[in-house]
Each structure stands twice: as structure tokens, then as C-alpha cells.
Amino acid sequence: MNNTPGLFRVVAFISAMSCASVATATTGYFALGYGARSMGMAGAVVSNPQDSIASASNPAGMALVGERVDVGIRFFNPVREATIYTSAVGAGSDYGTPYDVDDESRRNLHYIPNAGYTSRINDRLYWGISVYGNGGMNTTYDRNLYDQTAAILGSGAPNTVPEGVGTGAPQTGTLGVDLAQVLFTPTIAMKVNDRHTVGVSLIIGSQRFSARGLGNFQCLTSYVQANDTTGCPFYPNFPSSGLTDNNSSITYGAGVRVGWIGELSPNLTLGATVASKVYMTEFDDYDNLFAEQGDFDLPANFAVGATFKATPKLNLSFDFQRILYEGVSSISNSGPVLGPAPNPPVTGFLGADNGLGFGWEDINIYRLGAEYMYDNSWTFRAGFALNDQPIPSSEVLFNILAPAVIEKHATVGFTYQPDSSSEWNFAYMRGFEETVSTSQSAFGVPASITMHQNSVDISYSKKF
């Protein structure tokens, strides 16, 4: 059958996707699931592929979902808050009321497109492509929490700090970051025999990043340390141009993912997949923010899964995944520690090979999904996922920019199939509120970051 029109639709969608808003932070900054059907299962699809976006989780699945095209969109609502408790050391307004510096990030609604296409080459060999937002981080605080904290705690400035105003510190404007990652995964998958399937994907990545309002950290950059002879007592005479408030910087890179799915018995199917690090070019406009002169690779990860056919209509799937954030220096290197605000680092300065990072740790993710085929038209799904906390309490200060603290997710979803060649898919996800706090941030006062989130996925699928 000629599937060219379906392929053209996917290519057109891929082109439009480059302009999409992609910002997500669930299991660290990876997405919980990719596509509405996967999300309905809380991402537990390593051994139970759902559609042609399967190569985002396990490329072997592309040979098991049939010839099809899938196009979807996620409406993502992360709610992020941060507080620096300046009142803990007696700092407050001139009227005697303790004053904490806090704000909720705006821009709380994002749309994240995804798409996939699979086609048969022969009876055993399939090819396809999946396109999806891998993850990202986004915050926009109208109040610059770093500026205002420095103003309250330092330089003998007046304690009254109105919203949006700081004294005794450089006014560096709106605070926040925007990191978006889009992955293209062209895939070849083969049915080795009737029970075992393997697949391999080339991971082609593109990411966009910008940062705003980080001028308070100029003295911690490797550039300023090398070029400012005054010792940078508060704000440098010659600030780095590679730290903050530049245009969006775009990088590209590649990696590989391989996978296997095997039916051990009519009731038990296993799966396994491993993805290399995606090696990206450097963010040249932010070479004094990220360690290793702007390097920001995508971390390696691996997963295993099992699906048990409990009844002819009910499948239960369990996945275990590990994301190796500690393999990327700009993510895992420690951030600022306690000292004068902002303080000298224990290791290197921002942008250096051993420069400051976000202090993230490797995490394990446990997913449980259920799929119930009610009849020929309706399929219902539900899932729950639990992951480790990637952000230690000692790293709260820098992670005001990226408060990816969610640990528990619950999902529900369904598929409606009006005829044998098309279907509509829906999923809802709730990321339960989580807070990470410290009694002594790098400013010397307590701080906390909080997040909860909701998302809705909708997709349309056409089978050939």
C-alpha cells in the first residue's frame, strides 16, 4: 500500500514542530511518557509498545505496532514556586514585619507536539520515525529572587524591597531559563522470529536555551575571575557576555538507542532498551553558565519492562528506568555553597571544566500501567509512576531556575476507535506536589522550591 501521503503529513508536522513550545519537567527533565497512549500507561511501554512514537521508549516496538501515522499534542501545566526565607535571620521591612522573597513562575501552559510514522519493508523488517519533545526546563519569575535576596541581606541597604525592586545589588531583570529539547529518532526494527524483535534508532537532537536575570552570579564566572583585577567585590567591572540575557542559543547532536522485545510465553512479554548519551554541540552564548564552556549533553539512560496478560482483555505492565544525570557535568556538578552571597564555589567557577552545576543525581523510575480492551471501539488505561528525587536539599538555590522536584505521577487515558483504520487517544496526568527545602542555602538562609503539574494529551492515529 502507498503510505506516502501519511509520510508527508508527518514531515509537515516535523517542520511545524521546530517552532513549538517545548517545556517539561517530570522525571527530572525527561517526559513521563511520549504520546497519549504511552502517557495513559504512565510511560510503562518498554515491553508494551502503543504506537509509532514507540522508538522514544524502545525502538523494537516499531515493528509491533503496524503501519500507521500518529499525530498528537500535549497541553502541559507546571506550577512552580520558590521562596528564600530572608526573615529567618531577622531581615524584614522597615516596619518590623519579616520579609521573605518568594514568587510563582508564570508561563504555566505549554504545548508539546509529537508524531510518529511506521512502514513495513518486508515481512520482518520495518522502518519509521518518531518526533517528540524529550524534556526541558522553563521558569519565568517576575521578581528576581537572587537580586532581592542580595539586597535584603547585604550592603546595608534599606530592608524594604518592593516587588520587582532591589537595592544594593545589580538590577538584572526578570529571572528565569528556557530549555527545550526535540528529538528525531529514525528507526529500523526487525522481527527476528515470531517471538523476538530488535530495533535501533539514531537519536538526532536539537535544543534551545536562554537565561535571564543571572547578573548576580557574574563574580562566579571563569571569565570574570580571569579578567577582573579588582577581585570582584560585588559586581565586576568587566562582566562576562556568556552568562545571561543573550538570545536563544541552539545546539545539535546525536546518539543511539537499541532495544529488544521478547514473548517468553503467551502471557508474559519482556523488553529492554538502552540509550547512549546524546552528544550535543556547546551553547556558545552561555559558555560562562554551563560547565565545560557551555556543554549540555543529554544523559544516557536504560530501561527494562515486563507485560503480563492477566486476562484476554487486561494487560499489566511494569517498567524500571534509570537516567544517568551524573554523566553530564553541567547538570550534576555541585552548585554554590554557603558563604558570602553569592559565594565562591568549592570547585570551579561557572563555565569551567569543573564549573558549577545544578547538583542533580541519577534517578530510578518505577512505572506501573494497566490497559483494558473493553470492546472493539474502546480501550482504557491507567498508570502510576514513582521516581527518586534528583535534587538534593543542598542544591536548592540554583534549582530555583529548574525546580524539577516531582516524584509521583498518576495517569488515566483511553482510546476510541470509530473504525478499523483510525483512532482518537486521550490521557490525563497529575504530577503530585513536591517540595525540596534546605535550612541553609548558599545565601545563608533557608530556601525551598515546589512544583505540581497537570497535562492533557490528545492524538489521532491512522492505520494503513
Image (cartoon, grey):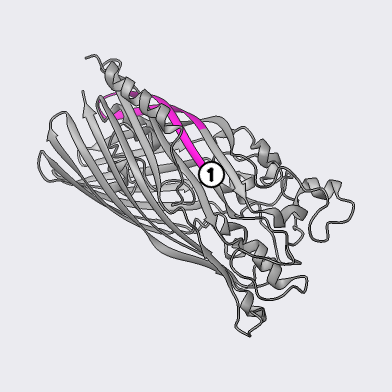
Residue at image location 61% in from the left, 39% down from the top? 247
Q: Is residue 40 left or right of residue 145?
A: left
Residue at image location 74% in from the left, 53% down from the top? 218
Q: Is residue 176 left or right of residue 219?
A: left
Q: Quadrant of the N terminus?
A: top left
Query: Mark 1: few, some, or many residues within 10 Å (few <14, many ≥20)?
Result: many
Helix, strand or loop for disc 1: strand
Q: Is residue 10 above or below residue 338?
A: above
Residue at image location 27% in from the left, 35% down from the top? 263
Q: Magenta span: helix, strand or loop, mainly? A: strand
Residue 290 at x, y percent in the picture: 66, 45
Regarding residue 82, the answer to whether it shows in the image is no
Q: Quadrant of the C terminus?
A: top left
Q: Is residue 382 left or right of residue 392?
A: left
The residue lying toward the viewer, choosing from 411 and 18, is 18
**Which quadrant of the structure image shows residue 422?**
top left
Residue 170 at x, y percent in the picture: 72, 59
Residue that lies at the very extreme toward the bottom in this rendered image: 96
Magenta stretch, residue numbers: 179-205
Residue at image location 45% in from the left, 64% down from the top? 434
The residue lying toward the viewer, choosing from 142 and 398, is 142
Q: Badge 1 is on which residue?
A: 179
Regarding residue 233, the answer to whether it shows in the image is yes
Residue type for callout 1: Leu
**Which quadrant of the structure image shows residue 345?**
bottom right
Q: Is residue 317 magenta?
A: no
